[in-house]
Image: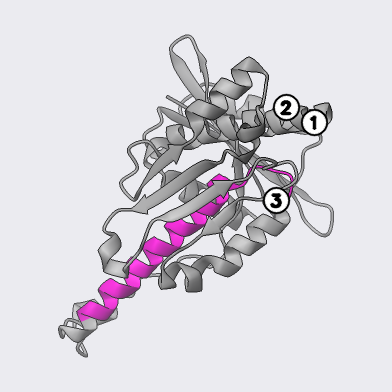
């Protein structure tokens, strides 16, 4: 029907925006590489405003390959986007390796459940990257123990590597926006404590592209169970940017959320 074709085109356009955002966010990231296929066909359909019958069976596929994958015997992760993603369907996630199946299957299912109707590839890829980094740390510590570096009284045993948070805060993002030779991208997360503010920043700054931004402006507002509001901002060198973001959040009555805007 005409409505179904319009819905498919809308989904395809959202997939394009999300894919382009992922390419911008993870460009140059030393932890992983992203390869996306099907974009040319999708872009052609969106530009023409027409979806041929065979086009409905066309899939945009996101392949995530991790650096130093041999250490954890990782295969590439395949994320296939069906025609009605994100409106009515979620991505088909093939984790491949036994390590990622064990470490991430539950977390991926939670993201798919909580983000129905929304784009969620960034959250899934970030969850995978966090799990791989933690797995590498554990493997390195285990190798140190076997080699004798962890013998009693040694410096290696006394210095414990702190565990990473088990739960990844889910972050959504806008598409990049360029104005006067500067590129901006916004990130937003639902938070309930100041600790989660720090966790969100840790997750974002683990992305090389975000860490290399000229400015990462932050604003957040949190309401506790007694109704008390905690709010703050960080201009990160961009005069009054964070305070203006907070002002907009107050005007919009946004609560228990955090906004980060990166500028390159």
Quickly name the residue at label 1. Answer: 252
Q: Which mark is residue 248?
A: 2
The residue sitting at the bottom extreme is 152
Is 69 or 137 nearer to us in this picture? Answer: 69
Question: Which region shows up in magenta?
Answer: 115-144
Question: How far is disc 2 from disc 3 in space, using C-alphas?
Answer: 25 Å
Dot 1: what SS? loop
Dot 2: what SS? helix
Percent across and percent down for residue 20 are 50, 30
Quickly name the residue at label 3. Answer: 115
Choose mark 3 or mark 1, whichever is in front: 3
Q: Earlier in the sequence, mark 3 or mark 1?
A: 3
Choose mark 2 or mark 3, whichever is in front: 3
Specify few, some or many for label 1: CA neighbours under 10 Å numbering under 14, 14-19, or 20 or more.
few
Dot 3: what SS? loop
Percent across and percent down for residue 175 are 57, 28
Can residue 244 be seen by looking at this rendering? Answer: yes
* Residue 165 shown left or right of residue 47 in the figure: left
């Amino acid at each position: 029907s005409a409505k179904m074709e319009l819905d498919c085109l809308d989904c395809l356009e959202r997939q394009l925006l999300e894919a382009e955002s992922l390419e911008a966010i993870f460009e140059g990231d030393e932890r992983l590489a992203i390869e996306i296929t099907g974009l040319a066909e999708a872009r052609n359909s969106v530009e023409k405003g027409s979806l041929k019958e065979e086009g409905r069976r066309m899939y945009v596929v996101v392949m995530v390959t991790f650096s130093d994958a041999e250490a954890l015997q990782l295969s590439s992760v395949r994320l296939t986007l069906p025609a009605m993603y994100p409106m009515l369907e979620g991505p088909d996630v093939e984790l491949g390796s036994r390590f990622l199946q064990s470490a991430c299957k539950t977390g991926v299912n939670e993201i798919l459940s909580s983000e129905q109707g929304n784009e969620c590839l960034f959250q899934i890829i970030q969850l995978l990257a966090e799990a791989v980094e933690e797995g590498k740390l554990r493997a390195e510590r285990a190798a140190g123990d076997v080699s004798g570096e962890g013998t009693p009284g040694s410096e290696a045993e006394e210095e414990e590597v702190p565990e990473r948070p088990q739960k990844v805060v889910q972050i959504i993002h806008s598409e990049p926006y360029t104005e006067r030779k500067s590129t901006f991208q916004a990130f937003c997360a639902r938070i309930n404590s100041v600790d989660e503010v720090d966790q969100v920043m840790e997750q974002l700054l683990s992305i090389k592209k975000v860490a290399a931004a000229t400015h990462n402006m932050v604003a957040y507002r949190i309401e506790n169970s007694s109704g008390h509001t905690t709010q703050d901002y960080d201009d990160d060198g961009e005069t009054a940017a964070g305070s203006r973001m907070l002002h907009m959040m107050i005007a919009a009555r946004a609560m228990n959320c955090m906004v980060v805007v990166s500028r390159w």
